Image (spheres, rainbow, N blue to C red):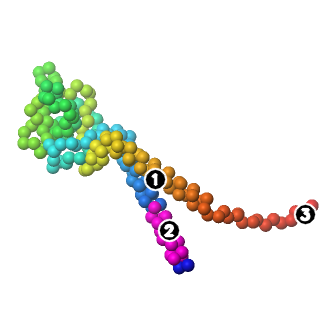
Amino acid sequence: MSTVTHDVPRRRVAVRLGRALVDLVLLVVTLAGVAYVVPWALGYDRYVITGGSMSGTFEKGSLVLEQEVPVDELAVGDVITYQPPADTGVSTLVTHRISSVTTTEDGVRQFVTKGDANPDPDPWKFNLTDSTQPVVEHAVPYVGYALIAMADREVRMFAVGGPAVLIALGAMVQLVRGLREPGTKPPATEAAPVQA
């Protein structure tokens, strides 16, 4: 008999730990979803730093949040994310600091950028054809690695399917527990006799 009485508290502890684990996973997934949506809702563009040219300022794997500003307001020192000119051979976006701004005779502003960790400026000049340009305002270290991982189909399926499986298992456990436990009758209510 003593074995049975010791098993009951252990089961309760296991059930509580299981519920706490499910709650923790759901909380983490919810917070991750909110963190993914909130910057977009506040008007920020998001970019992941994938190289080391801005080390010391933004490390590889950082998520940078950028606000659109008018191109006319860009100044030396602003950090921007842009596509280098096609003839440079660089096919990926670059996040670098503006190191110089010049205006051509016909009034076109030309920019030169430089990675903070690079010894020399980038070997190209470029102009921006859009009226606005994203400028880095905030950076969050390491979060970019999670976004890079979410680009992988299997990781996405696990990140979405894992919590769904936990919710389904939790619901099944509660259903089975409800079927096993004997039902309780609601307490009887006393009624006063009705006199006619």
Disc 1 secondary structure class: helix
Name the foreground residue: 177 vs 89: 177
- Give the residues drawn in magenta, as a range: 3-18
Whole-angstrom CA distance, mark 2 to mark 1, is: 19 Å
Q: How packed is label 1: few (under 14 Cα within 10 Å), some, or many (20 or more)?
A: some
Q: Which residue was labeled with disc 3? A: 195
**Residue name at image x 41 percent, y 50 percent:** 162
Q: Is residue 15 on the magenta stretch?
A: yes
Where 126 falls versus 136 (above or below)?
above
**Residue name at image x 45 percent, y 64 percent:** 17
Q: Amino acid at mark 2?
A: Arg
Is residue 109 in view from this perspective? no
Q: Which residue was labeled with disc 1? A: 166
Q: Quadrant of residue 186?
A: bottom right
Name the foreground residue: 40 vs 33: 33
Q: What residue occupies the far top of the structure in this picture?
A: 106
Q: Which residue was labeled with disc 2? A: 11
